[in-house]
Image: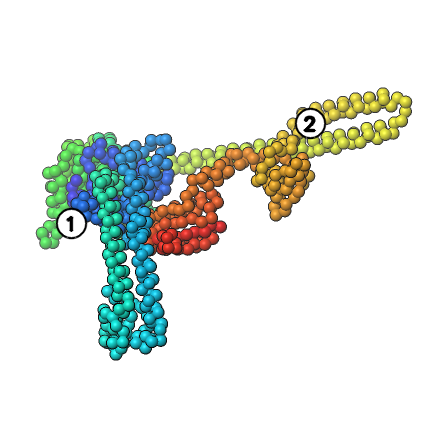
């Protein structure tokens, strides 16, 4: 691709934006090498990669790319038999963890689907070495600290060192606290010089404290003496520290050997991780630009829908709609200065180069771009005083180079073609150049002020006019591109509105030919008619949208009325059922009184008739209830519950209250139910299972979730190698899971490092809703490399 074109179109700024989105140095190096390709298949594959990355980021959020390091130097050391330092081994562990997390992340993301074939292909080729990762993390707890658990020998040595330190300190404490020695000492303290314990002795009492002098103060008044009583102990301590160093080097050599054995696989991981980081950087850039995947072709067709220059403010930039390569191959754009012609050229060129580099473009869906062999751009004034080149000479030098290198599958962008020289000669040259490029089949977009080029576009097949719209009323451009309409100069109208005398304007019109005036008037008429047609189209669209909105509102109101009608009918049925119940109760009461009052010989016969009448009355009431659509409430269980368990939700019939079973029923069926803050003793006959609650629990699966959390949640989480943002998000989710699982205490492993991760996590824990308290790990728990959290 032409280097000058990339510079003129400011592609380097796009690359810098891409570099900023890469997480690792490996990904940034790939982003720095980004350049457009002229191979159609490669461009399509790159676009697919970016599309998959964008989809994953939008659906799943951040991808776990933290902790990827460049391990080239580390692997060379491992291969030649040298050992890696603790910090270098931690970088190896972090990178292995990143590969493992990516595989796990993608496994969760697809859930049986296969929508991301390219990225899944890369991730499936990653190797995971959990055993190496775990062994490194078991042995190393900081950039320069080896864990006591690295080996039994190291643990024993360090315990012996601790006891030896304690013995030396006890011996020295007894010395500096004795009244006999205090007068000899400058300060009653114990210090260390050259890795040996010493005490500060006044110069004049040197002979009173036998021992070895290791240092003196700058004034010479104080000598730092190792008393003879602890010389042997210090020697033994020195030997132990040498043994510790040897054991640490042995452990580091062992860990390095594990890494060296898998050096080739880790190198392969490095390459794949750098590619994945680069691909997701493209996805993040696309999201930030609100960009879309263009439909690529290799037949020279461009159709940009609402394209926005990516380096302009998204809130203020006016979108551009432009097309070329279908019915015409050459587009001549005219219009006033500062009207947006140059921005249109740069937008077309930059979006084409971005697409050929595998980047999505800031435009709307349906945008189509072509893969060109070469893109040329002669934009801006590059005259050189040193080379004695005028504006015209500078432009013509660039155009000559373009004409010498152009091919039929090229895109040429020419700004102010033919400007900077005599208008007549400039226009003739411009027409000849455009005609030559059109004859070659080149896609060309040129801007100009020459009327001759407008006429050339009108009369030549395959060449089309375009113009940037200008509002004469406000004397300002609208930045809208109109294709099919040549631009009108508007010089007379602008001058008139600025206050130029009518006499001078009329005289100016008399100095140009009637044909030119008629041509300008025709342009004005065409532009006016097109504007009116667009306004009428916009009005039709507005009316259509308004009708659709009114239809939607009508349908919502109709649905609301239907719901209200059903509600009113239901209330009416309920009221009718109440009246029927009252009538039934009244009939039973009258029958009972008649029975008591009737004491005659035909009592049996009368009772039989009364019962028949009562039965007949109940049957009629039942039929009326059935016709009204009311009956027994099927939502309530009519039988006492069986197999009640503590925690079941029940309804107390006589109180019409919901409660939770607190104790199991005894042999008489008595139990305790918790209702709010009260505990009520009831019999099981007065209880019913709450079916709504039971169904809700069954549908939501809350019980299953809590049980599953309790079985799967670990008592610790390892955040090493993650960015602070990832670590905080993962810690928040982990604390929620631990709280649901009922854990009382958990361990958060963040390592020591620079302290950023540790401080960030501790600040988060101070305000977390599930955290009761948090403290640093004690000796044996991990020290300041972990935080112990007590949950509420």
Q: Is residue 486 visible?
A: no
Residue 345 occupies which quadrant of the picture? top left
Residue 377: give x, y in percent of width and height. Answer: 18, 42
Q: CA distance from mark 1 to mark 2?
A: 95 Å
Residue corresponding to mark 2: 625
Instruction: Give the mark toward the camera: 1 or 2.
Output: 2
Q: Is residue 740 visible?
A: yes
What residue appears at the point 88 percent right and 27 percent down from the top-left corner?
A: 598
Residue at far left of view: 387
Q: Secondary structure at mark 1?
A: loop
Residue corresponding to mark 1: 382
Residue 96: give x, y in percent of width and height. Answer: 28, 42
Does 383 sit left or right of 123 as displayed? left
Foreground residue among 616 and 354: 616
What residue appears at the point 78 percent right and 32 percent down from the top-left corner?
A: 586
211 over 59 or under it: above or below = below
User: Nearer the N terminus, badge 1 or badge 2?
Assistant: 1
């Amino acid at each position: 691709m032409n280097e000058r074109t990339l510079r003129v179109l400011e592609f380097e700024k796009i690359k810098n934006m891409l570099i900023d989105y890469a997480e690792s140095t490996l990904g940034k190096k790939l982003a720095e090498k980004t350049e457009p390709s002229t191979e159609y298949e490669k461009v399509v594959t790159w676009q697919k990669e970016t599309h998959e990355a964008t989809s994953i980021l939008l659906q799943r959020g951040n991808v776990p790319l933290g902790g990827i390091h460049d391990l080239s130097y580390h692997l060379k050391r491992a291969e030649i038999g040298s050992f890696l330092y603790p910090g270098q081994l931690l970088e190896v562990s972090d990178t292995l963890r990143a590969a493992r997390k990516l595989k796990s992340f993608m496994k969760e993301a697809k859930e049986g689907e296969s929508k991301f074939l390219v990225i899944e292909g890369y991730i499936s080729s990653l190797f995971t070495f959990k055993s190496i990762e775990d062994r490194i993390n078991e042995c190393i707890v900081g950039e320069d600290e080896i864990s006591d658990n690295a080996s039994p020998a190291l643990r024993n040595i360090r315990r012996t060192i601790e006891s030896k330190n304690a013995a030396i300190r006890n011996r020295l404490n007894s010395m500096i606290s004795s009244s006999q020695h205090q007068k000899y000492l400058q300060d009653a303290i114990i210090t260390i010089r050259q890795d040996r314990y010493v005490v500060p002795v006044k110069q004049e009492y040197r002979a009173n404290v036998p021992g070895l002098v290791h240092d003196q103060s700058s004034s010479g008044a104080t000598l730092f003496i190792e008393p003879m009583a602890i010389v042997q102990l210090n020697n033994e301590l020195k030997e132990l520290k040498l043994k510790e160093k040897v054991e640490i080097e042995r452990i580091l050599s062992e860990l390095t050997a594990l890494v060296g054995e898998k050096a080739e696989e880790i190198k392969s991981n490095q390459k794949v991780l750098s590619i994945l980081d680069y691909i997701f950087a493209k996805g993040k850039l696309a999201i930030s630009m609100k960009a879309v995947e263009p439909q690529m072709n290799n037949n020279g067709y461009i159709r940009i829908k609402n394209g926005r220059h990516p380096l302009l403010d998204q809130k203020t930039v006016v979108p551009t709609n432009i097309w070329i390569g279908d019915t015409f191959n050459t587009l001549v754009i005219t219009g006033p200065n500062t009207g947006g012609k140059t921005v249109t050229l740069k937008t077309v060129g930059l979006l084409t180069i971005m697409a050929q580099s595998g980047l999505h473009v800031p435009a709307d869906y349906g945008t189509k771009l072509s893969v060109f062999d070469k893109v040329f751009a002669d934009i801006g004034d590059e005259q050189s005083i040193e080379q004695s080149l005028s504006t015209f000479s500078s432009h013509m030098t660039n155009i000559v180079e373009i004409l010498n290198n152009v091919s039929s599958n090229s895109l040429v962008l020419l700004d102010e073609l033919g400007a900077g020289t005599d208008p007549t000669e400039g226009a003739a040259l411009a027409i000849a150049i455009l005609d030559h490029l059109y004859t070659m089949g080149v896609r060309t977009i040129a801007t100009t002020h020459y009327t001759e080029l407008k006429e050339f576009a009108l009369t030549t097949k395959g060449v089309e006019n375009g113009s940037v719209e200008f509002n004469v009323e406000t004397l300002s451009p609208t930045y809208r591109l109109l294709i099919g309409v040549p631009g009108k100069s508007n010089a007379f109208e602008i001058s008139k509105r600025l206050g130029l005398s009518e006499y001078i304007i009329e005289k100016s019109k008399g100095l140009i030919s009637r044909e030119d005036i008629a041509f300008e008037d025709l342009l004005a008429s065409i532009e006016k008619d097109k504007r009116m047609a667009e306004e009428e189209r916009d009005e039709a669209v507005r009316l259509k949208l308004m009708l659709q909105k009114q239809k939607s509102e009508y349908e919502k109101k109709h649905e609301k009325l239907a719901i209200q009608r059903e509600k009113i009918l239901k209330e009416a049925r309920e009221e009718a059922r109440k009246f029927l119940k009252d009538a039934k109760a009244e009939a039973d009461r009258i029958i009972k009184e008649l029975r008591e009052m009737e004491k005659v010989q035909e009592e049996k016969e009368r009772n039989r008739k009364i019962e028949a009448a009562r039965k007949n009355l109940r049957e009629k009431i039942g039929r009326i209830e059935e016709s009204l659509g009311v009956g027994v409430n099927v939502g309530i269980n009519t039988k006492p519950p069986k197999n009640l368990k503590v925690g079941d939700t029940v309804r107390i019939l006589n109180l019409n209250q919901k409660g939770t079973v607190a104790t199991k029923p005894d042999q008489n069926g008595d139990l305790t139910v918790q209702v709010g803050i009260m505990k009520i003793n009831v019999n099981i006959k007065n209880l019913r299972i709450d079916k709504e609650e039971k169904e809700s629990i069954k549908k939501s699966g809350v019980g299953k979730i809590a049980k599953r959390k309790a079985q799967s949640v670990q008592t610790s989480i390892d955040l090493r190698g993650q960015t602070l943002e990832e670590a905080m998000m993962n810690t928040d989710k982990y604390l929620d899971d631990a709280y649901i699982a009922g854990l009382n205490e958990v361990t958060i492993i963040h390592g020591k490092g620079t302290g950023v991760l540790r401080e960030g996590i501790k600040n988060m824990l101070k305000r977390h809703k599930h955290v009761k308290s948090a403290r640093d790990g004690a000796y044996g728990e991990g020290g300041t490399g972990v935080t112990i959290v007590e949950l509420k």
